[in-house]
Amino acid sequence: MKLKLLFAGLATALTATLAQADGHMPDLDGREVTVVTENAYPPLQFIDPDTNDAIGWEYDAMAEIAERLNINVTYENISWDAMIPAVAEGQFDLGMTGITIRDDRAEVVDFSAPYMRSEMVMLVRGDEDRFADAAGFAADEDLLMAAQPGTTPFYVGVYEVLDGDEANPRIKLFETFGAGVQALKTGDVDLVLTDGTAGNGYVASSDGGLKIVGEKLGTEDFGFIFPQGSDLVEPINAAIEDMRADGTLDALNTKWFLEYKLGG
């Protein structure tokens, strides 16, 4: 059985490689694929406040991938802290929620090729004047930061902004990214670290209520996650590269990060 699966995986990888070489996508014959997401990371994926529909960059990208590969996608919702373990255990075929490609995560799940690169920024209220950079935030012990446990913003906050103590009481933990941004708006915290794409989306839709301060704190690549050994990785990589080559990824960036106004 294991040998059969190995040969199946090699065949899929070869098909994807050949597809990229000759410009045609592999045909997965209507395969059912269950995708899990958080719906709390605009503009990548979130609930439209006007229609209550799940929308975003990643939903549009997955629709493109589904069409190119001939797969049928269904969606499930899960919290961020449960997502990687659930995908690793094979409960879902694929996970998406702006997941940073990291070596420690790659020990338990497989990643797709990067579909987006972003840089970490400091999101604050529009009238914030107590600090203008990471050093200024760190120096004022009364200031609080929102983060989701186990995320890239959490680790950047701990090790690049604060003192390296993961139990630092100045970091207030929230189950979703959106909850942290809401806490920022209401004054319960003073800083949210986020990738620049999502941060710019929030600023653009805030009517001056939010802004970005300081220097960028690092670069990260986003990828989809799969159970280890998944035979979906290579076909989806082929679709990502096809979308990069024909301008689809750039068009999605323009739609969701420049044209779309959250809540408007």
Image: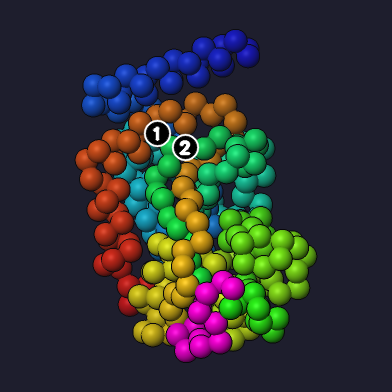
Instruction: Return the x and y of residue 139 as percentages of the image width and height.
Output: 65, 78
Instruction: Return the x and y of residue 46 as percentages of the image width and height.
Output: 46, 63
Disc 2 element: loop
Q: Main secondary structure of the magenta part?
A: loop
> Residue at point 40% right, 33% down?
237
Numbered circle sitting on residue 237:
1
Instruction: Return the x and y of residue 125 as percentages of the image width and height.
Output: 49, 83
From this viewpoint, is residue 71 visible? yes
Front residue of 78/24: it is 24
Residue 124 magenta? yes
From this viewpoint, is residue 175 visible? no
Q: Toward which corner of the image does residue 162 lie, by quadrant?
A: bottom right
Q: How many C-alpha atoms fall within 10 Å of the one at disc 2: few (<14), some, or many (≥20)?
A: many
Q: Which residues are magenta?
A: 123-135
Front residue of 126/240: it is 126
**C-alpha separation, residue under disc 2 versus residue under disc 1:** 6 Å
- Looking at the rendered image, the quarter that the N terminus falls into is top right
> Residue at point 66% right, 55% down?
150
Q: Toward which corner of the image does residue 19 lie, by quadrant?
A: top left
Instruction: Indicate the amino acid at tag 2.
Output: Ser
- The answer to which of marks 2 and 1 sits earlier in the sequence is 2
Instruction: Indicate the amino acid at tag 1.
Output: Asn
- Looking at the rendered image, the quarter that the C terminus falls into is bottom left
Q: Are marks 2 and 1 in contact (CB under 8 Å)?
A: yes
> Residue at point 37% right, 24% down?
16
| Picture colour scheme | rainbow
| Circle 2 residue | 112
